[in-house]
Image (cartoon, coloured by chain):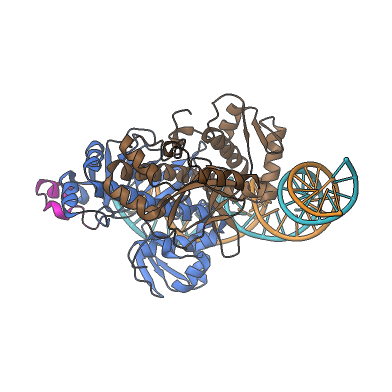
Chain colours: A blue, B brown, C orange, D cyan
Amino acid sequence: MLEEVRSATRASHPRSPEATLLGTRLAASPFLSSEERHALESITLPPRSIAAYKDLLRQCEPAHHVEILIEGWACRYKTTREGHRQIVALLIPGDVANLDTSLFTRSNYSARTLTAAKTISVARDRISSLAEQHIGIAKTLAWLAMRENAILSQWALCLGRLSARQRLAHLLCELSVRLGNAVETESRFELPLTQEQIADMLGLTAVHVNRMVQQLRAGGLIDTHGRAMTITDMAALRRIGEFDPAYLHDQRA
Amino acid sequence: MLEEVRSATRASHPRSPEATLLGTRLAASPFLSSEERHALESITLPPRSIAAYKDLLRQCEPAHHVEILIEGWACRYKTTREGHRQIVALLIPGDVANLDTSLFTRSNYSARTLTAAKTISVARDRISSLAEQHIGIAKTLAWLAMRENAILSQWALCLGRLSARQRLAHLLCELSVRLGNAVETESRFELPLTQEQIADMLGLTAVHVNRMVQQLRAGGLIDTHGRAMTITDMAALRRIGEFDPAYLHDQRA
DNA sequence: CGGGTCGTTGACACATTTCAAGTTTAGTGG
DNA sequence: CCACTAAACTTGAAATGTGTCAACGACCCG
């Protein structure tokens, strides 16, 4: 597969290590000195390509590495005994898949790719001991965890108190911002998710997500062609989803 | 009111500062040296009594203090435009109310007491600069945030994929563990929450919570007399709520 | 060309909400 | 200690949002 070949090439000819973490949430930390940035780069392992629908991490299995997504999409999820899945975090390029395993030995969620993806990783022991020596790194871990907290709190509000239509609108708005789209009346991006995966984020059924997508489409709010998602009336979609980007702590929005 | 008097006394005759943070989640951190513990104690402000249903923190207003609950119950919550409330965290004695404002300037939730309560607090600037000097404190912030994350992820699973009955069972099990009750077949604790507040945690209606409480009662799983909650069949309640205490990272459970 | 995944549609079931009483409980003042 | 009030809990009937089941169509990839 093409992905495999490309990563093999990169592994044998590693780029300047400075570039590896670039564009990553870790690197976006306001708390890192350049020395600390270098320390982090130095313990980062080379990129690894992973096919779609592969587990990065399984609930309750000890995790020895912290994985950072640099290409493709992934998610954290949990399942009920009857096999229903709830996605508890959507991971896009730059996101850290299993931040908490830097301090805890085992996670209480699984993580898997949703598309073909590429990750870099850091050994658990090494980031943990690095956080022991560098204040900025420890503070960065706290900062990342608190942002995830803010997103999870917002999801709780959506899951508990918004209608299916509102939840979908909210998710699309969140994605638009997180993918770095400007806050215009129109926004276009690739949405490589099946309606079933969207359902697993919103706590709904694939069938019902389908109906809601059609409803938004019929209302002239969004437009879809294959994986291409266009938000044609951002203001209205935000109003419906009660979306306020403040919780993302993103300057752009 | 009795509470007021007691706190005034304590404020004018401060106890040994070592005792203030005792029993608090902050103090439970495995990352604090005794020096760091003292540093934290030294910046802790004296206890303050607060009546029930008072806001500790309002969404989007800048927070200058990190508040730690030492008596009574409180919650973090968010509301929709139509006024529906979702509680995103239940705070019991020892919990930190607004951890994230130690690094972010404003929170994206409100916090309020659910009963008469007592808090101690730490100035935002002081804990932030303390985290600048002491690795253990920075690491503790990360550790606390990650535990909150684990709880929120679990709540997302409950809100998205469990039935009303399951969610209630799960909440009662979580409370039993968090309140430090042993894991026996029977557990008894004070539950100073109205059914409406429970509904706001579970993303349900007070009326429906009432029906589910009755259902659990009729099934011989729980027993309530006023504020006294008794779980009479813990094993069965755990099975129903699909409760596994691992996500609480609590040694007792 | 064929097979499987994903999207779409319709009819129906059901969990939960809504609305609108009633009853109990707890708190307060006389 | 009782009377009064408001808040909390309880109950029932009807409305509704979302789930379930089952089928069909479109598209992609080998």
Magenta stretch in the rendered image: A5-23
Q: Is residue A122 above or below residue A183?
A: above
Reply yes or no: does residue A14 show up in magenta: yes
Reply yes or no: does residue B8 show up in magenta: no
Q: Quadrant of the C terminus of chain A?
A: bottom left
Q: Residue at x 62, y 50 (%)?
A: B52
Residue B62 appears in view: yes
Task: Kindly give the residue lying farthest to the bottom in the view shown.
Answer: A185
Task: Kindly give the residue lying farthest to the front in the view shown.
Answer: B13
Residue B129: image location, x then y, percent: 31, 52
User: In this orientation, which residue lies closer to the viewer: A73 or B239?
Assistant: B239
User: In this orientation, which residue lies closer to the viewer: A218 or A107?
Assistant: A107
- B109 left or right of A5 in image: right
Residue B117: image location, x then y, percent: 57, 46
User: In this orientation, which residue lies closer to the viewer: B248 or B98?
Assistant: B98
User: In this orientation, which residue lies closer to the viewer: B118 or B238?
Assistant: B118
- Quadrant in the picture for residue B188: top right
Residue B29: image location, x then y, percent: 38, 37
Residue A46: image location, x then y, percent: 17, 46
Task: Kindly give the residue lying farthest to the left in the view shown.
Answer: A13
- D16 left or right of A51 in image: right
Q: Is residue A193 above or below residue A83?
A: below
